[in-house]
Image: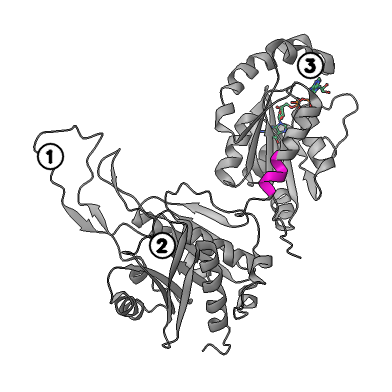
Amino acid sequence: MLTLNNCGMLVVVAGPSGAGKTTLAKHLVDKIPDTRFSVSCTTRPRRGNEREGRDYHFLSEKEFERLREEGYFLEWARVHGRLYGTPGEWVRERLREGLNVVLDIDVQGALQVRERHPAAVLVFVLPPSVERLRSRLVGRGTDTDEEVERRMTAAAEEVGWAPAFDYLVVNDDLERARRQVESVMISEGLRTSRLPVDGLLEYGRWPGGRSYWNGVRAVVSAGPTREPIDDVRFLGNRSSGLMGLSMAMALRDAGAEVTLVHGPTSARPPDGVKPVAVRTTKELLEELRRLVPETGFLAMAAAVSDFRAERKLRGKTERREGGLDLRLKSTPDVLGELSPRCPVLAFALEMGDDAEKRAERKMRSKKATAIFVNRGDVGGIGMESLGNEGVLLFENGRRVEVPFSSKRMVAERITHEMGLYLGGGDAR
Ligand code: ADP
Ligand code: 5GP
């Protein structure tokens, strides 16, 4: 049977105080298997029957500040005058174990989580009306009248952030709201970007090169880079970043520790890899320089902009008759400047019948271990498409044709072949 194991998912339930976040978050933990509730730290006093370690970790302001400075929190915020924060390492450990984690936090915190963990699922819980929110806050019996009014004022601002979330659940009928948050988690768990493709690989007759990757520190570059013309416009290319993201997923599922250095893409970085966002070719080079000394494998799938404006204009250049002359300079040759000591897989998009010859020359001049070349002048593959096909060339002359398939499967095939080659198997 085809079994697809789920990778850990980070779910953030946020919304105004009294909306029903805790009620719904706890429901998810009860209902969805392998799901844990993240217990936050707070500096507010303990209420009624709240228990240390179950409801919150209650800290003094001083203790909280110390932890904050140590980088202990995945996110933190001052909410209704008190400090609240999510313990970062606890969350990361659970996700690494393949468990789902549910955070019940405020809106500011949710937005910070999105920045640090782009694959997180953000659910906004909205009370059905202002009156119902007030009556729930009063009915909960945990806050003074003054505190209730403070929370009502905050709610008005928080609701403005609902459209920035992935899902909106109106918590009117509790049973329905429970079913809705459950379906969000069930559907999100079925996203192909989250799922390892082990089951699908059983259908292929590929060489078993995956075991090589266990514990290898891999860096994958992905997406286009953008070179500014002025503060608004840029030079770029049509790369979607999907090939690099697919390489990151394939290496992740084979057991590598993956850092993904990506230019601006609309696809969101996959779970279980460390994303680092860059914009220009120079920024990409700087990040890679920082990472390369600690790296065991480098996959250069980014489509960098090879040119930049010699002089960046300030502000937004006005439209003018007669147009605008731009002088372009070359951007840095990333691989040439890095000269990494680890094995390198380069990617090349080439036009015309001698695409392979040119890619081979590129591999040799850049001292790469291998190069994957795909044609830029054939419809349905490469840039802006979901599929790809090409040839994987190795420094020792080995040549592997990778047939037309989804970019994810092409990435799996490359990962197998590279693993076999680097592991010193028959392929060498
Ligand atoms: P939050 O965590 O967002 O502050 P809670 O989960 O503590 O909100 O819910 C606030 C109060 O409203 C609680 O007393 C809870 O039992 C109640 N409540 C939650 N959802 C509903 C609902 N759909 N209908 C009626 N009462 C609700
Ligand atoms: P309460 O004091 O009522 O338990 O929570 C007040 C608000 O703080 C709620 O909106 C709750 O979701 C939020 N909150 C609880 N824990 C955290 C946290 O770790 N981080 C952030 N940013 N907000 C939190």
User: Circle 1: is it few (<14), some (14-19), or many (20+) Cα within 10 Å?
Assistant: few
Q: What's drawn in magenta, residue-wise?
A: 184-189
Quadrant in which the N terminus appears? bottom right
Callout 2: SS: loop
Q: Amino acid at mark 1?
A: Gly
Task: Identify the residue under disc 2.
Answer: 381
Task: Identify the residue under disc 1.
Answer: 323
Check residue 136 in the rendering and tell me which mark sits there, or answer none: 3
User: Circle 3: is it few (<14), some (14-19), or many (20+) Cα within 10 Å?
Assistant: some
**Rendered location of residue 387, percent (x, y):** 47, 61
Q: Which quarter of the picture shows residue 333?
A: bottom left
**Rendered location of residue 101, percent (x, y):** 73, 46
Query: On screen, 268 above or below 335?
Result: above
Q: Is mark 1 within 8 Å of ligand 2?
A: no
Give the CA separation, mark 2 to mark 3.
Answer: 55 Å
Judging depth in this view, the residue of 219 and 50 nearest the camera is 219
